[in-house]
Image (tube, helix red, strand yellow):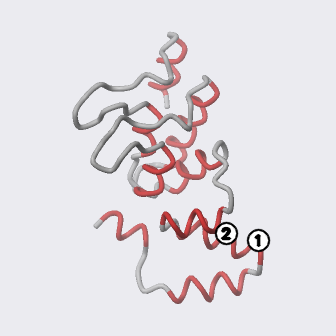
Amino acid sequence: LDRVRSALEQKADPNVALVDKRHNGYTPLIWLAMALPTVKGEQVAQSIQALIEARADPHRESGESVFGKLVPLRFAAQLQNRKGLDALLKHVDVGDRFLWAAGENVEHVMLEELRKNFDNETAKHVANLSRYSAQATVLL
């Protein structure tokens, strides 16, 4: 977080992107979105917020890769640093959050939506049906 703030104070471009074969078009938001679930989410979320306040574009895609062009939210969904993912979701309209989360395998967002639309018992019942932990799977 300190590095992000320091760079922004020195007028760094929050949308700067790498020109590199492996990390083509990766922006600071993409790098933060790639934080593993074991990384402190508060710092990731605060850094994401600082970049967006400095006009980083949460919709800016990476360069072309074998997986296509991906936005920061897609990286965050794959790696599931919960607080980082939630920070990006505040700035990106995904439409139906439950359907988006189901398509991206983001269990905690699906359960939040079930709690909102039904009740805690329903969400708990659905959570207990899962044999696997999404976060443990990411770490595997």
Residue 134 image-quadrant placement? bottom left
Q: Mark 2 points at which residue?
A: 112
Which corner quadrant holds the C terminus? Answer: bottom left
Mark 2 is surrounded, within 10 Å at the Cα level, by few (under 14), some (14 to 19) or many (20 or more) other residues, namely some
Which kind of residue does numbered mark 1 sit on? Lys
Which kind of residue does numbered mark 2 sit on? Glu
94 and 48: which is toward the camera: 94
Q: Distance between the residues labelled 1 and 2?
A: 6 Å
Which residue is at 60% across, 52% downward?
Answer: 86
Which residue is at 52% across, 57% downward?
Answer: 82
For residue 37, above or below residue 17: below
For residue 75, above or below residue 115: above
On the picture, is 75 further left or further right than 119? left
Residue extending farthest top: 10
16 and 69: which is toward the camera: 69
> In the image, residue 115 lies at what x, y percent?
72, 75
Do the numbered discs 1 and 2 sit on residues whose CB atoms are within 8 Å?
yes
Q: Name the residue under label 1.
A: 116
Residue extending farthest left: 21
> In the image, residue 62 lies at what x, y percent?
40, 37
Q: What element carries label 2?
A: helix
Mark 1 is surrounded, within 10 Å at the Cα level, by few (under 14), some (14 to 19) or many (20 or more) other residues, namely few
For residue 127, above or below residue 63: below
Q: What element carries label 1?
A: helix
**The disc label shown at residue 137, or none:** none
Which residue is at 25% across, 29% downward?
Answer: 20
Q: How many labels does the image show?
A: 2
Residue 137 image-quadrant placement? bottom left
> In the image, residue 15 lies at what x, y percent?
49, 24
For residue 57, above or below residue 77: above
> In the image, residue 29 lies at what x, y percent?
48, 35
